[in-house]
Image (spheres, coloured by chain):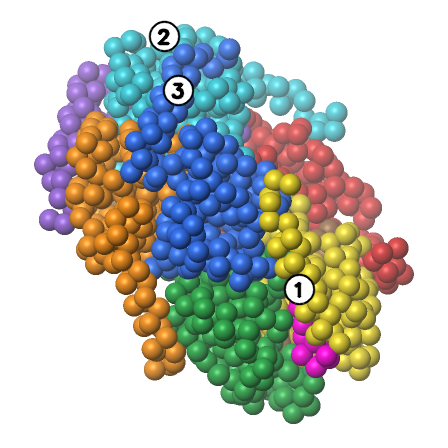
Chain colours: A blue, B green, C yellow, D brown, E red, F cyan, G purple, H orange
Amino acid sequence: MTVGIIMGSKSDWPTMQHTADMLDSLGVQYETKVVSAHRTPHLLAEYAESAKDRGIKVIIAGAGGAAHLPGMAAAYTSLPVLGVPVQSKALNGQDSLLSIVQMPKGIAVGTLAIGNAGAANAGLLAAQIIGTHNTEIQQNIEEFRRKQTETILANPNPAE
Amino acid sequence: MTVGIIMGSKSDWPTMQHTADMLDSLGVQYETKVVSAHRTPHLLAEYAESAKDRGIKVIIAGAGGAAHLPGMAAAYTSLPVLGVPVQSKALNGQDSLLSIVQMPKGIAVGTLAIGNAGAANAGLLAAQIIGTHNTEIQQNIEEFRRKQTETILANPNPAE
Amino acid sequence: MTVGIIMGSKSDWPTMQHTADMLDSLGVQYETKVVSAHRTPHLLAEYAESAKDRGIKVIIAGAGGAAHLPGMAAAYTSLPVLGVPVQSKALNGQDSLLSIVQMPKGIAVGTLAIGNAGAANAGLLAAQIIGTHNTEIQQNIEEFRRKQTETILANPNPAE
Amino acid sequence: MTVGIIMGSKSDWPTMQHTADMLDSLGVQYETKVVSAHRTPHLLAEYAESAKDRGIKVIIAGAGGAAHLPGMAAAYTSLPVLGVPVQSKALNGQDSLLSIVQMPKGIAVGTLAIGNAGAANAGLLAAQIIGTHNTEIQQNIEEFRRKQTETILANPNPAE
Amino acid sequence: MTVGIIMGSKSDWPTMQHTADMLDSLGVQYETKVVSAHRTPHLLAEYAESAKDRGIKVIIAGAGGAAHLPGMAAAYTSLPVLGVPVQSKALNGQDSLLSIVQMPKGIAVGTLAIGNAGAANAGLLAAQIIGTHNTEIQQNIEEFRRKQTETILANPNPAE
Amino acid sequence: MTVGIIMGSKSDWPTMQHTADMLDSLGVQYETKVVSAHRTPHLLAEYAESAKDRGIKVIIAGAGGAAHLPGMAAAYTSLPVLGVPVQSKALNGQDSLLSIVQMPKGIAVGTLAIGNAGAANAGLLAAQIIGTHNTEIQQNIEEFRRKQTETILANPNPAE
Amino acid sequence: MTVGIIMGSKSDWPTMQHTADMLDSLGVQYETKVVSAHRTPHLLAEYAESAKDRGIKVIIAGAGGAAHLPGMAAAYTSLPVLGVPVQSKALNGQDSLLSIVQMPKGIAVGTLAIGNAGAANAGLLAAQIIGTHNTEIQQNIEEFRRKQTETILANPNPAE
Amino acid sequence: MTVGIIMGSKSDWPTMQHTADMLDSLGVQYETKVVSAHRTPHLLAEYAESAKDRGIKVIIAGAGGAAHLPGMAAAYTSLPVLGVPVQSKALNGQDSLLSIVQMPKGIAVGTLAIGNAGAANAGLLAAQIIGTHNTEIQQNIEEFRRKQTETILANPNPAE
């Protein structure tokens, strides 16, 4: 296991699945778990504090609304933590984004875009982090990037 | 002690002092403490979990930015928790407000206005809560309310 | 009756029903009534002023748009008042939230999240307030909290 | 007296003075009074309900934050009510604006701009309303408008 | 004709029809016309400048997006002008609202809520303005207000 | 070719097609191409740097979210660049708008409205730019403007 | 004269001076004038309608708040119109920006950034438009661009 | 060199200096350079493309307004890129934040808070990333974290 994906509720899975899919496509191993900052705070503490010893290199946390999961995970570990603002019902994820990104000095969360794009990119950024010391993952990322560039170059006509 | 006032940083004190002042003026006992959700998460857990046994009836938490303190305090206790969004530098407390108020179903935070007015009202609401079972506090509140009404009635001329 | 639930219009009921459901599940008695700050201001004054004598301990008011009901209820009583911002059509409840939470110093409203989650949590917070002096309600809350924690612990796999 | 100017607090006077100044310059009589929706709700009811019989034709209400004064004045009278969103500290009057303008169907408030410009224009619009049946006021308005047009025409160089 | 209802496009009619319906129900005569500030600026000038002589007492203008119609109508007349922010596609009427309400000192627009509620209330406020000098309209408004109050009083149960 | 229309993804075509349609209706020649600032940055550099030599007079770039395409195109050419904020999923194009319009001093993008209206107007503005030195295009624009004015004048009844 | 710079008030000059300065530095001739959409609507019509015959190629309009000047100028001419949102007092130019950029299909305004940067860039974009058919201006722009690039390349150390 | 800190302008240095200070305090080597996405796009391409070969492990990019620097740096490298939204003049960094965080799927930027706190945390997160494979840096981070926790624990009284 090198990446831990956690989310506050099963209802976040349709978003966070894009993280898992990206990690799959880049050959990065990961685990997934429902961990709620508000409803299971002790589990969160235990999860984040033990992550490094279990071989986790990066934690990705997705949450919506008053999204405290990424910031609290970061409070319990010195591993890099990435946050995915899940699109919320009333405020479309503006609340999720601000709750995750506006961390005070001293505890950092690397925040991605609201929703599916951000979830996929959390997987990509986690792979990039791991790739700084893993040649195979690094090559997978460059292959992924090459293909996405080629797809556009090969299909320049927007109306087709 | 019947009210616990906590805040994420000493820099929140100029705001949260209005909570203390209001409780003083209403005759409600309280304690104050710096407790950071991000920098002292274990202290927060311990503080909130032990509050009821120490005789606390209401916890008031003030925080700014990605303000996780009120929601995380609520995660660790079944006492009523009130949240004060401290006015932040870049976003004027819009981030603090959304981070505090947009709690998911199952863990509640009663949120007050951004800044000093909200801090004072957190003290007032805590007193109102305590006043539901304390005649003296209840009378103090009604006296406070009566005076603030009379002050306006006695000074109707805005230009004076 | 220990909780009074009021709302500005029958169209707020699908939201405020979540308050009633939460109170039911926690064993708290309540009454519900349509009271409009704008269309029945005298009824509102009478309702809020008489609430304490009718045995009400907490008033929960839900309203949308220029949501004046919670603040005006608070103006007429010294009981604790909780406000639920109903999700509005054009602005998704941002207007409701600001109209309820940004109260001036001296009259407090404890504000919950926009929409259904906030409505449910208003019920929960009212129960927590009552629970400060009612052991049975207090135990019901702790049982509710325990169950919601266990539900997550028992279902850690988000993809199931 | 033909216009009643009310505001929630003396601190609103530096804004609302622009209403008074405009009415003075247009020859419209007015009265001013501090009336708080939250701290003097009975005074507000009495003020608005008696306004028509005292010869008031238009009520102008200025308030900031969770600005309930204009909407509640409108709830108590069938006279036209104009609302001035006073610029608030944390949110610069965005809360005041939404709290005043987003009234539900059935109770109307004609809302002006945030701050001094809106306060002056509330006086102008009140004069325009009175001017629909008062030739002298109507002429004063047209003279005011003519002068402000001429001032620009006579000073076309922005750098002078 | 005592009220002129204009709108920038036929697509605004589903909103502005609520203005017409309200005026119908209050016995106020009106005319309706498509007038675009951007596409027919000369028609707008002519319409607004001639309105008073045609017996119009109040102009109601509805527009969305960069909604210039109400403000430009006000620029061409000294009659009271009311503005209705039509709910826009991308920004839900936030652009319409700010474009209408934030008028500079010297040209006033009384702005109502975004969308249907605001459209209906524009009709109501226009009637209130006319009612200041028309006993019959005044009585119709009070009857309308009485009925809407009674409807709530007669149906207090939100769940029915 | 006198106008180059580029967009970050094929998914922007339903919006940017309105640009093409407008240019077609005004008799302006154009080319369309998918060019991504993020996924094909070298293609963007090459496209924008070579545009003038290929006879392009105006570049129109449409993009959504963190919309860097218009600003980066402008960084690589001294031709006028127009930007179209495509309506994004979570934030409805507010992110697209700010990412395009808030350019620093020294590199300019002329920004149009969010979505289809902005896309059509980008075509219109490009034609207006070309029309400053092309009588035929200029006449086509004036004919287009005349027709759109006449359409309104001929259909003044909103309810028809 | 090839560029016409207009603004709604002398108070906009400190912003719009940056437009004049940029045009000066690029060798583009221009005129400046105070023209208010709201206070001098006939002057605006006359100004915009006669601009082309006076040799104007581009109109730049700066305005704040409910900023109608750019859109109304565009309504009266087929010349390209650029809009500069002046930073407003309460809303920091968010109202100005939306009032200018959110134009409906059929009348276009190329909008620049809020405040001084946008004002300077309006001058730059106007020069780029003129440069499409003027080699000297085109060369001046490229020289300006070259210098601003070189300034950065020559000063890479941010701390110096 | 293990971290590259770039910023669009020298005016961003007072913010980005907090990144440098944090890296200094954690014992991480870094370089700093002014690189503008808009004014030196070729330098940016060259900088980002060559970063890995120069031994850079993480790029930190700070920018304000239409902040394209982080996203464009990410477009040119497969190294992890962190973005710092610099607080902008008119919109307080809301434009910077959205321009940086709302990246499309396929190119990721880990975004920190607006302003100084975000700049410091970018340094911290970069150190955490490097610390995943560097025991000394990892220990420095844990020491930093321990000290900041102890500082709070040793100073619990907010009023002191």
Horizontal arrangement in the rendering, residue C25 relative to residue D33 (left or right):
right
Which of pointers 2 and 1 indicates the residue nearer the eye? 1
- Residue assigned mark 1: C146
Asked if residue G148 can be seen in this view, the reply is no
Please name the predominant secondary structure of the magenta segment in the image. Answer: helix
The reply, left or right, for residue H100 in relation to residue C153 is left
Does the segment drawn in magenta span residue C129?
yes
Near-viewer residue (H21 or E71): H21
E127 versus C159 height, above or below: below
Q: Is H55 covered by the magenta stretch?
A: no
Q: State the residue position of label 2.
A: F1
Instruction: Using residue E28 as the reference point, say whether residue G45 is left or right of it.
Output: left
Tell me the amino acid under the disc marked 1: Arg
- For the point 46% across and 58% down, the residue is A72
Residue G146 seen in render:
yes
Tell us which disc is closer to us: 2 or 3: 3
Mark sitting on residue F54: none
Q: Which amino acid does label 2 sit on?
A: Met
Residue H75 drawn above or below residue F79: below
Q: Mark 1 lies on which chain?
A: C
Q: What residue type is labelled 3?
A: Lys
